[in-house]
Image (spheres, rainbow, N blue to C red):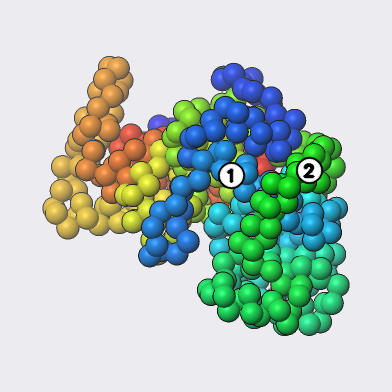
Amino acid sequence: MSDVLKLFNAIEGKPYYKIWEIASLKDMILQLNDRYPDYTAFQFRKTPQSDVIKKSFSETRQDMDAFGSALMDLKLHDCKIAIIGDNRYEWIISFLATVNGVGIAVPLDKMLPPNEIERMLDRGEVDAIVYSQAFHDTIVDISQRRPGLKACICMNPDDEVAFSDFTRDNPAFYSFNQLLERGYKRIENGCKAYTGIVIDPKAMRILLFTSGTSATSKAVMLSHENVCSDIMGLAGIVRFEPGDSVLSILPLHHTFENTAGLLFPLYLGMTVSISDGLKYLSKNLVEYKPDCIVGVPLIFEKFMNRINDEIKKKGMTKKVKTVMGVANVLRYTGLDLRRKLFKQLLASLGGRLQVIVTGGAAMDIKTAKFYENIGIANCNNKLNIDC
């Protein structure tokens, strides 16, 4: 492997693989429903201690339609809807339902302090917000100063019964599950207010705030056409099979993760496994056995250092280096035994990991070589999809 990183714009290059056209993200979800209805689209836990839940592409489409129908019932058509919280299925459904017919999604950084959250709601002229339980007190406080907020929707109340009692005195507050059930009933009654919406691919449907080098974040407007062109561009050069899986680690409000770690894998018919958080990464790797991980270089450096520490404790550092050298020589003869020789090392990463994709910064050449040596390809994002 050369020490010089060769970069190119894959979006402008000639595709290696055949792609299927998508006119919008809604078109993509509908086509996925037809192509892979029973394949698992998502697997996740409500909490790190609960059982794994799986959602098929068909169920995902139905949940999107139901939640979108409920939002329409709240008179939120053409409104700006902010989403803030940890990565979770409810975050994804809220995002998909909003951009695929209701209005404009405004993903917010969950690390923002309360005063900045309120400032972003003002700057984005937000009409409603979907939030994680951890932000409940903050949103209640903000809502008292912003009577213009039409709806505040909690994705995961700690106690649905207690939250239902709270909403009686706070009519602008709703729980995600309450609205999901409401949406399903509307669809059962023949309502097509959401499902019948036709998407304009060129219209702004995502408004996000960058975390650039200047003190003030910049507002970026994205359309279905913008995102879909990136998805199809990636599909022309990166190949996975339907049923393969990716582990979602990075925050979904970042366009890089949102596109490369969520929407692009779905386009390929892959399963998106939602991590329980950095604290549970090792556990998630072993149980979800991802074929691909999208992350930042620091995450993969930590994985590498942990593996190397274990090798050092066992006094096998010299032996492993020797085997890596032999494996690389054999590769030049057309015999690739890396994944067999380093099966035990790969097991700590789930055993099936084939590709790692990094964004935000270039991966250190030593880290890239380590993964290459044990049979894992690495790709550094330079596709201009990270705002």
Q: Quadrant of the N terminus?
A: top left
Q: Is residue 194 visible?
A: no
Is residue 45 in view? yes
Q: Position of residue 44 (x, y in %)?
A: 46, 53
Q: CA distance from mark 2 to mark 1?
A: 18 Å
The answer to whether residue 260 is above or below residue 387 is above
In-front residue for pair 123/287: 287
Q: Is residue 353 left or right of residue 185?
A: left
- Residue at horizontal 76 percent and vertical 73 percent from the top: 172
Pointer 2 residue: 192
Q: Decide which of tag 2 and tag 1 comes sooner along the chain.
A: 1
> SS for tag 1?
helix
Q: From the viewer's perspective, tell me whether residue 79 is left or right of residue 302.
A: right
Residue at 79% from the left image edge and 50% from the top image edge = 102
Against 49, residue 3 (above or below) is: above
**In the picture shown, does residue 106 fall above or below 366?**
below
Horizontal arrangement in the rendering, residue 354 relative to residue 123 (left or right): left
- How far across and how far down the image is residue 190, in percent? 75, 44
The x and y percentages for residue 125 are 85, 64
Placement of 219 over or under 153, stated as above or below: above
Q: Identify the residue shown where x is 58% and y is 44%.
A: 60
Which amino acid lies under the numbered mark 1 shown in the image of this protein? Thr
Question: Which of the pair 184/16 is nearer the observer?
Answer: 184
Q: Which residue is mark 1?
A: 60
Q: Secondary structure at mark 2?
A: loop
Graded by Cα atoms within 10 Å as few (under 14), some (14 to 19) or many (20 or more), the crowding at tag 2 reads few
Residue 247's disc is: none
Instruction: Name the mark nearer the viewer: 2 or 1.
Output: 2
Query: What residue type is disc 2 on?
Result: Lys
Q: Nearer the viewer, residue 364 or 302?
A: 302
Q: Position of residue 306 (x, y in %)?
A: 30, 56
